[in-house]
Image (spheres, rainbow, N blue to C red):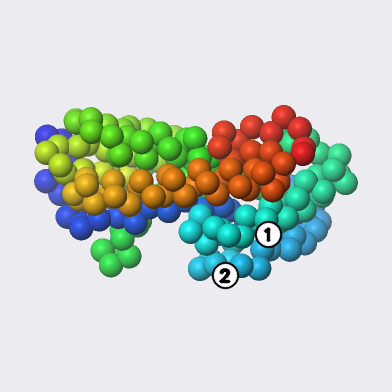
Amino acid sequence: MEPWFAHAKPIDSLEPEIAFHLQDEFRPVSGGPAEPLALPGFPRAERLLARTSEVVGHEAELAAYYAQVVAAARRHALKPDQVRHYFWMDLRLDNDGAGVELSFPWYDTFATMDHFLAAIAGNDQGMIYDDQDQGWAIEVWARNGTLYIRQSDPEADDDPGQAVTLPRAGLQARIAPLRERTVKVVAQLAKEFGADVWTTGELPSFP
């Protein structure tokens, strides 16, 4: 057992969700004048975030939003990699009642997120996931049907991080439909948009 297991906060589960980051303006040059982007009109809990559960049935509308980004990029003769950040995604796991939120600030494609989700969904024991990048780290251990998850800042000596413990089966039951829904949403979005920018983040050319 890791020493921090003893201090992990027991919770019943976490609610995982994947979302698409939205921006209401396009800036061809950092710090330069901005051009407005019309946001999708479908209902969302957060103005600049479209959860996969909210996107279902509205993929064409979201694709139209991304088409604005491409049109603006073409007007300013920008390359696809110069507007990649307009297509970023977001993964969060939270439990509002327990005041717990786990974020993955360096994961912006479904492929990177799915490595984590697949580890939780599997049956491996011991340390099943470990990653870190610029002021952020996460490690996940599985032991006898229980998960121990800690998120911390490895660059801060005085940061104990946030550690939780929860039943693995409950989180697995929530992850399965999330992965399935995200795959379907991205596939439909790619069909409407003309390219899949969200699975791996690769966009060799504009559609």
How many other residues sit within 10 Å of disc 1, few (<14), some (14-19) or many (≥20)? some
Cα–Cα gap, marks 2 and 1: 12 Å
The kind of residue tagged 1 is Glu
Instruction: Tell me if 189 is positioned left or right of 120 in this view.
Output: right
Instruction: Examine the image and state in which quarter residue 62 appears.
Output: bottom right
Instruction: Tell me if 169 is positioned left or right of 197 in this view.
Output: left
Which numbered circle lies on residue 141? none
Q: Is residue 100 visible?
A: yes
The kind of residue tagged 2 is Pro
Which numbered circle lies on residue 61? 1
User: Considering only order in the chain, which callout, 1 or 2, is on the residue closer to the N terminus?
Assistant: 2
Q: Which residue is drawn at 11% across and 38% down?
A: 144
For the N terminus, the image quarter is: top left
Q: Can residue 84 be seen in this view?
A: no
Mark 2 and mark 1 residues within 8 Å of each other at the beta carbon = no
Q: Which of 31 and 140 is in front in this view?
A: 140
For the C terminus, the image quarter is: top right
- The kind of secondary structure element at disc 1 is helix
Instruction: Tell me if 97 is positioned left or right of 146 in this view.
Output: right
Check disc 2 and report the residue beneath it.
43
